[in-house]
Image (cartoon, helix red, strand yellow):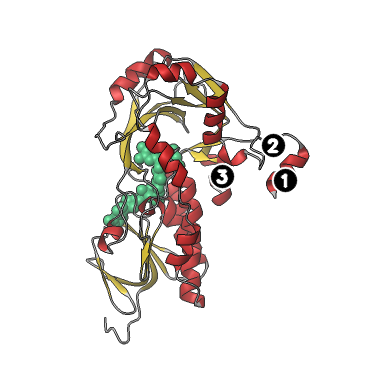
Amino acid sequence: MDQQHATADYDLAIIGASFAGLVAARTAAHRGLKVAVIDAKNEPGARVRTTGVLVKEAVDECDVPAALTRKIPGVRLYAPNGKHTDLTAPGYYFLATDTAAIMRWLAHEASRAGAHMLFGARFTGATRHETYISLHGLGISTRYMLGADGAKSSVAKAFNLGRNTEFMIGLETEYEETPSVDPDYLHCFIDTQLAPGYLGWVVPGVGMTQVGLAVSNGLFGETRKPDYQAFLNHIDTRFAFWNCEVLRKRSGPIPCGGLVSPLSGYRVLLTGDAAGLVSPLTAGGIRLAFQYGRRAGGAIANYLLDDGPDPGLVMARDYPRFGVKTWMRRLWSAAPPNALLNATLFTPPMRALAKRIYFEKRRTARGRFPQTPSECKNYAL
Ligand SMILES: Cc1cc2nc3c(=O)[nH]c(=O)nc-3n(C[C@H](O)[C@H](O)[C@H](O)COP(=O)(O)OP(=O)(O)OC[C@H]3O[C@@H](n4cnc5c(N)ncnc54)[C@H](O)[C@@H]3O)c2cc1C
């Protein structure tokens, strides 16, 4: 392409057709940009790497169809000795999802908004010219690029942007639906021998049951690997998964070191896991991918169409910092002894902390859950 008279093929090329990339594509295309979404997968919903549980706030960011979800009102928290306590908050719920179907729906929505979907196309590098960027091997040029390509972002690498350096490793197996799992709870297992640095889970999913665990490296960087079989042995007297058909297995890295830096360069920006937008405490990234994917799509449209401010500067102000949460997570990776957890997990201060972590957004300004109509009104404000 002649650099002096360049007309790029697209205004915006988004690498990664997952939660962040597809929501950004829908917004940017609705705002009038010519958008391409590029993903190495052959089709939307292929090779899902997530449990896909949504916190309630995720639905406020992206109205996912109820038919693709299952409501789970509470959390059942298990101590290492098997005792458990139930946590709920008025009006709060989690959503288990048919994640592959949600991906197909999001891709359809982005397409309907006008974005071009290019599946089976891997981003391997790009050359930046004065007014456009050309993508190697794909025969595509674009005015702006958004890296929504996950925890180990190739866009970050290609443009010398910040990259995630701290990860948890998650492993999960999907079983056929089983009646031994109470469907009203996310079952979370605290055990620093079996899941040091995070926890294990059993999720009553949409038409199946998901069983997984994640671990983080030690406080001083010692490598840890999840031992799925040991975790399964620990919980199987309760659930009998040995008796259930295995439908799928998955694993993946979960960034847990907070925001990467720098987040952007000239005409290129990172979002979602690529930017480190995962809560270090809950390891949840989908709500943030929805929220900031949409914001990033809008900021890029403002920049290209209306001479708006640099999207990198806008998002650097908007993206959350996770400072305290990152340090709390690092502390948890020290893996306090199970005996200590057995003795303290269900004490009032620990229950309050667990409630704060799971139902954070439901607290009022005064630090407790809204009880009266006037408190609910204040909370809404
Ligand atoms: C085991 C596990 C369980 C989890 N459970 C939950 C949970 O229950 N709830 C929650 O909120 N979060 C969970 N997370 C975190 C959550 O999955 C991520 O935060 C979320 O998927 C991030 O979305 P994203 O769009 O940024 O990137 P991703 O979902 O990682 O998608 C990146 C996309 O980029 C594509 N891609 C990557 N490289 C290239 C390339 N070079 N060229 C073209 N395409 C490329 C990939 O194919 C992929 O489609 C979990 C993570 C793991 C690993």
Q: Which residue sits at x=43%, y=50%?
A: 19
What amino acid is labelled 1 in the image? Asn
Tell me: is circle 2 under 8 Å from ligand 1.
no
Q: Position of residue 115 (x, y in %)?
A: 43, 64
Residue of label 3: 57
Mark 3 or 2: the one toward you = 2
Which circle's residue, 2 or 1, is located before the other in the chain? 2
What amino acid is labelled 3 in the image? Glu
Whether pointer 2 and pointer 1 mark residues with C-beta atoms closer than 8 Å, the reply is yes
Task: Give me the C-alpha separation between circle 1 and circle 3.
Answer: 18 Å
Query: Could you say which quadrant of the image residue 125 lies in?
Result: bottom left
The answer to whether any part of residue 50 appears in the image is no
Q: Nearer the viewer, residue 112 or 17?
A: 17
Residue of label 2: 370
Residue 140's place in the image compared with 230, above or below, is below
Q: Along the horizontal axis of the image, is 321 left or right of 147? A: right
Q: Which residue sits at x=72%, y=45%?
A: 378
Query: Could you say which quadrant of the image residue 219 lies in?
Result: top left
Q: Position of residue 135 (x, y in %)?
A: 27, 68
Residue 334's place in the image compared with 48, above or below, is above
The answer to whether any part of residue 166 appears in the image is yes
Query: Could you say which quadrant of the image residue 161 lies in?
Result: bottom left
In which quadrant will I find the N terminus? bottom left
Task: Give me the C-alpha separation between circle 3 and circle 2.
Answer: 16 Å
Q: Along the horizontal axis of the image, is 27 left or right of 237? A: right
Residue of label 1: 378
Task: Decide: few, some or many residues near mark 1? Use Cα within 10 Å; few <14, some 14-19, many ≥20.
Answer: few
Q: Secondary structure at mark 3?
A: helix
Q: Which residue sits at x=27%, y=57%?
A: 154
